[in-house]
Amino acid sequence: MLKKFLSYVSIGLSIGIGLAGSLFLVVFLSHEYFSPSPENFALEQDGRQVETLKAIIKSLPESDADLCKNIQGVWYGSRESNDGAYIDSWEVEYKPNGEFIGTFISKSIAAETSENQKGTWTCNKSILMNDLMIDGERFRFNYLLLHVGDDQRTYVHIGPYELEEVFISYRKRNI
């Protein structure tokens, strides 16, 4: 009787350990393959942004004027956040050699931060792309140019899924 009881316990214990091991493997593998790591998440975001850019570029009619030709120069502007908590302002120079340099200031009731940025820019089919490094990490900011005149530029930030914030900048003239 004791022998039979011990065999049932050992069988039950073996089955329990097997099920626990299987459950661990399923959870571990599903987390590894289906839950993005920070690196994979960044790649997925880049992939979504690339697809959004492709869709926007394909949707632009061929007959539309390319607004890239009038980008060079110094542009400045400011924008209040939707909740009114802070105001962002900027001054950026787009150089003929494809470089840009700019100062970006964010003001809130509690603090003010200023950041100098420099990088490269390209523009194609009314899509302005700014590439820069921030704290050793590469960033690309993409904008759809809606209007570029002699003194004013209207553009919208292209996010991972959609067109996001609209900006207006003004050309800085030497007086």
Image (cartoon, rainbow, N blue to C red):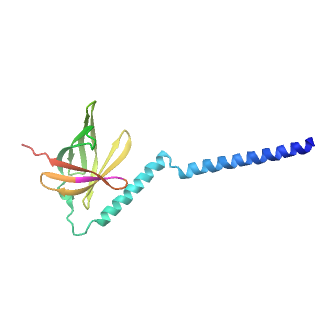
Q: Is residue 104 visible?
A: no
Residue 117's place in the image compared with 69, above or below, is above
Please tell me whether the stretch drawn in magenta is mainly helix, strand or loop. strand
| Apparent side of residue 38 relative to residue 25 in the rendered image (left or right) | left
Range covered by the magenta-colored residues? 155-159
| Apparent side of residue 115 relative to residue 38 in the rendered image (left or right) | left
User: Residue at left 26%, top 42%?
Assistant: 81
Please identify the residue farthest to the top as the structure is shown: 110
Task: Looking at the picture, tell me which residue is in the foreground, 15 or 89.
Answer: 15
Q: Is residue 132 visible?
A: yes
Q: Where does the image place residue 9, in percent across and percent down from the top left?
A: 83, 43
Residue 30's place in the image compared with 64, above or below, is above
Task: Looking at the picture, tell me which residue is in the foreground, 175 or 155.
Answer: 155
Task: Looking at the picture, tell me which residue is in the foreground, 51 or 161.
Answer: 161
User: Residue at left 24%, top 39%?
Assistant: 87
Number of labels in the image equals 0
Please identify the residue farthest to the right as the structure is shown: 1
Which quadrant of the figure contains the C terminus? top left
Please identify the residue farthest to the bottom as the structure is shown: 63
Residue 27's place in the image compared with 109, above or below, is below
Q: Where does the image place residue 99, in percent across and percent down from the top left?
A: 25, 48
Q: Residue 91 is drawn in which quadrant?
A: top left
Q: Where does the image place residue 43, in percent across and percent down from the top left?
A: 44, 52
Which quadrant of the figure contains the N terminus? top right
Please identify the residue farthest to the front as the structure is shown: 1
Instruction: Residue 29: say if magenta.
Output: no
